[in-house]
């Protein structure tokens, strides 16, 4: 139940190439919120690229770093959190995101995702002979997790700007129904 939660932030989840970063930046500007990308934070902390973390330490080590970041988000306010595409597959992460965020999943079909990411080389999970098959398989595996979001938005039929407006509208509506919590403690830095 959204009404019984304290919603201070917006978390964007969804597969690679669904536009979380672009929509997130737009939303942050519209709402005057800060923007946080879990991948960027992990790279800064680890001092290496995600692809290097995958190749040197392995995917489980990366997932552990993701879970640590999510655990810290509990006391944040006024933040748009853009998450890595596989972050929600760790069973603790979705409930943790939901404690303070409206969780919005951006969705697209495997073919559209492939068209969007095929010229990019920074996705270690797609370094395979048949990336489209891998996308199809991973998306099917992850769908149950993505479906636990508060809002599921098809990105194929809307521009980035339209999606940001739509999410901002929903967020403001939900916030207007929440009890006034002025004066409560908050943390807005990392
Ligand atoms: C991943 C998605 C990437 C990044 C890492 C793993 C995934 O983030 O976290 O390469 O498991 O889908 P984006 O969704 O921002 O590309």
Image (cartoon, grey):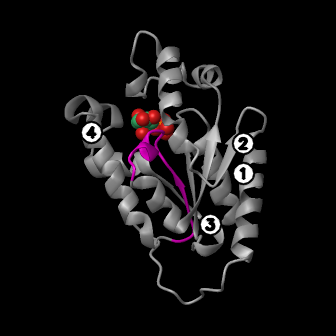
What residue is pinned by disc 1? 164
* Residue 159 % position (x, y): 76, 39
Residue at horizontal 50 percent and vertical 67 percent from the top: 99
Tell me the quadrant of ligand 1.
top left
Marks 2 and 1: CB-CB under 8 Å? yes
Instruction: Give the residue at x 51% y 43%.
Output: 145
139 to 151, vertically: above or below: above
Helix or strand or loop: what does disc 3 sit on? loop
| Residue holding disc 2 | 160
The circle drawn on residue 1 is 3
Of all residues, the one furthest to the left in this rendering is 56
Query: Which of pointers 2 and 3 indicates the residue nearer the eye?
Result: 3
Q: Residue furthest bottom?
A: 183
Quarter containing the N terminus = bottom right
Is 66 one of the magenta-colored residues? no
Give the image quarter of residue 112.
top right
Instruction: Report the front residue among 98 and 24.
Output: 98
Q: What residue would you read off at disc 4?
A: 60
Relative vertical location of residue 75 with respect to residue 145 in this rendering, above or below: below
Of marks 4 and 2, the one in the foreground? 4
Separation of disc 4 and disc 2 at Cα?
A: 32 Å
Q: Which residues are magenta?
A: 77-91
- Ligand 1 within 8 Å of disc 2? The answer is no
């Amino acid at each position: 139940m959204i009404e019984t939660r304290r919603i201070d932030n917006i978390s964007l989840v969804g597969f690679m190439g669904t536009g979380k970063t672009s929509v997130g930046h737009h939303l942050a500007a519209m709402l005057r919120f800060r923007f946080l990308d879990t991948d960027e934070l992990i790279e800064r902390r680890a001092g290496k690229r995600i692809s290097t973390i995958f190749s040197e330490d392995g995917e489980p080590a990366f997932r552990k770093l993701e879970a640590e970041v999510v655990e810290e988000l509990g006391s944040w306010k006024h933040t748009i959190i853009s998450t890595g595409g596989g972050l929600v597959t760790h069973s603790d992460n979705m409930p943790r995101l939901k404690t303070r965020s409206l969780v919005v999943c951006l969705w697209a079909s495997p073919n559209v995702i492939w068209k969007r990411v095929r010229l990019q080389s920074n996705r270690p999970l797609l370094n395979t002979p048949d990336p489209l098959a891998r996308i199809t398989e991973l998306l099917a595996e992850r769908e149950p997790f993505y479906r636990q979001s508060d809002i599921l938005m098809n990105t194929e039929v809307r521009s980035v700007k339209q999606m940001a407006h739509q999410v901002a509208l929903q967020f403001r509506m939900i916030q207007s129904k929440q009890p006034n919590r002025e004066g409560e403690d908050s943390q807005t830095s990392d």
